[in-house]
């Protein structure tokens, strides 16, 4: 439920416009804000198919060790 | 007599070393091709013919004086205009950068040390932020096989200059497919190395977590020579891993008997045009003939990989461009600023999660796919080569990384090495390629499979007709 709420927040074009102006000083047309919201929703939907990583997985750490570990020539 | 520009990079380097011809003659031949093709394709953003001939003369003098010749001694190359060259303005395909570089990118310095000659800076999509080869500031790059068709991008000029024999090879960069996609559309070999295999010091970034530098060449043998020169750790780039660099050329020619090639069963990879499917099927028959075992394989669900890859690349590009987006929005071409803007609104937890997922998903693919096969084969692009006019970034059907990077971006996210290899021609005469993917740091396996495939098929010997 909490995840759905967070996902919905990114889909509100008005929020996108407000963030653009307040955080980045960027003015967006209504159509552009709507497009961004729609593209964000697509990304959200796609990412939701991924299995959840364990809570102790630090960003990028296991990725690098796996790359090196799987290397047939790791130094 | 064969025009020297038609030789492969390996044959050119060998010919110079053995004094069969000079670097000056070879460079003249490449410059003649540049004269024939540049106005048609726009492959170069800056061509330094005078400087290249002077460098060639110096290379010849060194050979005459008995000096030691590097592996690329006297060979004319050119590179995507994204690599820093000291005292030179690197445009990155944009009108925003306005200061010359203060140092040279590690990869260019390594090619210089190997004796290569740099003809100039090649076309790219603005800030490497696109996949089609369009550029509003410098003009669209055109495909030498058909000037109305796209080249693919963002390493558009690298693919075109190599395909048209203007140079013997080139470097490109690949975030979500920017080497492999143009290699497919232009009919050349394009290698995206493992993340961390090649230094990115002095390379203008697109997405720090995904960017790689790799070779584009006519043959896998040529790509091996280029990768040999640029691979390895670098004090200037902490992300360039201290993993031993094998002798890539020595690994070429090893029989494929026992090699296991997997073909994904998932409809994600099989939903492509029948013509492309037939070309891929034919390529698999060649591998089987060469002794490889080709089998269908179940893969983990690939759909999340492309979205996660886009979350990472968009968020990082936005971090890089936020200041310019706010202060110089009009200096971006159509569609480019928009592609960056999206990243401004990706919540931090989403971006962090996209990075946290990376290890888990890589482990899944290593266990479930690369524990069973040595190489995975997929399409690079599943449809006919689009027209330039139909895919304009400000037109009704702008190209998207979701569509163009469908088969490439997932493997960027996983950090795995992958290579595009030409597999023949579509009915309309445009080339097509396959993508092969391997375990981390197994570039020699990719190069060897591609090399033996090319030796068997000879697709790389076909060239676009030189304009008169």
Image: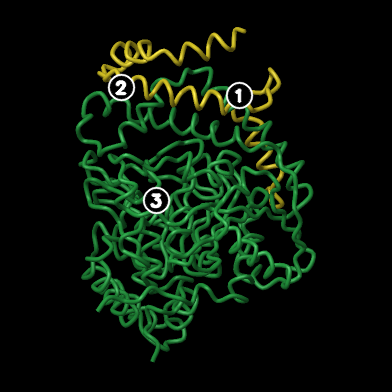
**B150 and B105: which one is in front?**
B150
Q: Earlier in the sequence, mark 2 or mark 1?
A: 2
Q: Which residue is mark 1?
A: A48
Tags 2 and 3 in contact by the CB under 8 Å rule? no
Mark 3 Cα-neighbour bin, 10 Å: few <14, some 14–19, many ≥20: many
Residue B99, image quadrant? top left
Tag 3 secondary structure: loop
**B390 and B209: which one is in front?**
B390
Q: Colour of chain A?
A: yellow
Q: Residue at x 26, y 60 (%)?
A: B42
On the image, the x and y values in percent for residue B270 come to 63, 49
To which chain does the residue with label 1 belong?
A
Q: CA distance from mark 1 to mark 3?
A: 29 Å
Tag 2 secondary structure: helix
**B437 and B279: which one is in front?**
B279
On the image, the x and y values in percent for residue B122 come to 31, 57
Tags 1 and 3 in contact by the CB under 8 Å rule? no
Tags 2 and 1 in contact by the CB under 8 Å rule? no
Q: Which residue is mark 3?
A: B153
On the image, the x and y values in percent for residue B94 come to 25, 43
Q: Nearer the viewer, mark 2 or mark 1?
A: 2
Tag 1 secondary structure: loop
Question: As drawn, which residue projects farthest toward the front?
Answer: B274
**B79 and B412: which one is in front?**
B412
Residue A27, image quadrant? top left
Q: Nearer the viewer, mark 1 or mark 3?
A: 1
Q: CA distance from mark 2 to mark 3?
A: 28 Å
Q: Residue at x 67, y 37 (%)?
A: B362
Quadrant in the picture for the N terminus of chain A? top right
Q: Which residue is mark 2?
A: A31
């Amino acid at each position: 439920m909490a995840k759905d709420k967070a996902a919905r927040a990114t889909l509100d074009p008005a929020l996108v416009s407000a963030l653009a102006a307040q955080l980045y000083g960027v003015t967006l047309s209504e159509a552009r804000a709507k497009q961004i919201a729609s593209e964000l929703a697509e990304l959200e939907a796609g990412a939701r198919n991924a299995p959840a990583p364990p809570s102790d997985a630090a960003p990028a750490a296991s990725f690098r060790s796996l790359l090196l570990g799987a290397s047939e020539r790791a130094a | 007599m064969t025009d020297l520009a038609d030789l492969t990079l390996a044959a050119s380097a060998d010919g110079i070393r053995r004094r069969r011809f000079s670097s000056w003659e070879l460079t003249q031949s490449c410059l003649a091709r540049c004269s024939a093709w540049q106005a048609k394709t726009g492959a170069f953003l800056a061509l330094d013919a005078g400087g290249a001939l002077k460098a060639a003369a110096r290379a010849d003098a060194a050979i005459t004086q008995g000096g030691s010749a590097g592996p690329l001694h006297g060979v004319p190359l050119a590179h995507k205009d994204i690599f820093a060259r000291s005292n030179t303005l690197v445009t990155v395909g944009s009108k925003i950068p306005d200061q010359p570089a203060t140092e040279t990118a590690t990869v260019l310095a390594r090619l210089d040390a190997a004796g290569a000659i740099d003809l100039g800076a090649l076309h790219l999509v603005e800030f490497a932020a696109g996949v089609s080869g369009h550029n509003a500031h410098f003009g669209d790059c055109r495909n030498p096989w058909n000037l109305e068709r796209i080249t693919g991008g963002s390493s558009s000029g690298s693919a075109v200059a190599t395909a048209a024999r203007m140079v013997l090879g080139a470097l490109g960069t690949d975030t979500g497919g920017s080497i492999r996609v143009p290699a497919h559309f232009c009919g050349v070999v394009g290698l995206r190395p493992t993340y961390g295999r090649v230094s990115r010091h002095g390379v203008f970034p697109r997405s720090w977590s995904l960017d790689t530098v790799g070779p584009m060449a006519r043959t896998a043998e040529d790509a091996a020579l280029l990768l040999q020169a640029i691979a390895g750790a670098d004090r200037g780039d902490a992300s360039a891993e201290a993993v031993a660099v094998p002798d890539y050329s020595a690994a070429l020619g090893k029989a494929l008997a026992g090699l296991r090639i997997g073909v994904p069963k998932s409809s994600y990879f099989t939903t492509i045009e029948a013509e492309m499917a037939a070309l891929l099927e034919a390529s698999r028959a060649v591998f089987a003939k060469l002794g490889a075992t080709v089998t269908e394989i179940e893969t983990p669900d690939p759909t999340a990989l492309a979205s996660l890859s886009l979350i990472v690349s968009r968020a990082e590009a936005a971090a890089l461009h936020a200041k310019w987006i706010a202060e110089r929005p009009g200096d971006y071409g159509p569609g480019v600023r928009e592609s960056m803007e999206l990243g401004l609104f990706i919540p931090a937890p989403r971006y962090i999660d996209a990075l946290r997922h990376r290890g888990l998903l890589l482990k899944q693919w290593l266990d479930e796919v690369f524990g069973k096969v040595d190489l995975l084969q997929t399409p690079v692009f599943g449809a006919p080569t689009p027209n330039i006019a139909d895919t304009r970034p400000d037109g009704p059907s702008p190209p998207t990384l979701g569509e163009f990077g469908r088969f490439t971006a997932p493997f960027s996210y996983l950090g795995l090495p992958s290579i595009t290899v030409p597999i023949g021609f579509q009915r309309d005469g445009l080339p097509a390629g396959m993508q092969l993917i391997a375990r981390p740091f197994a570039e020699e396996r990719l190069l060897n499979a591609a090399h033996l495939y090319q030796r068997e098929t000879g697709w790389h010997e076909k060239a676009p007709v030189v304009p008169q």
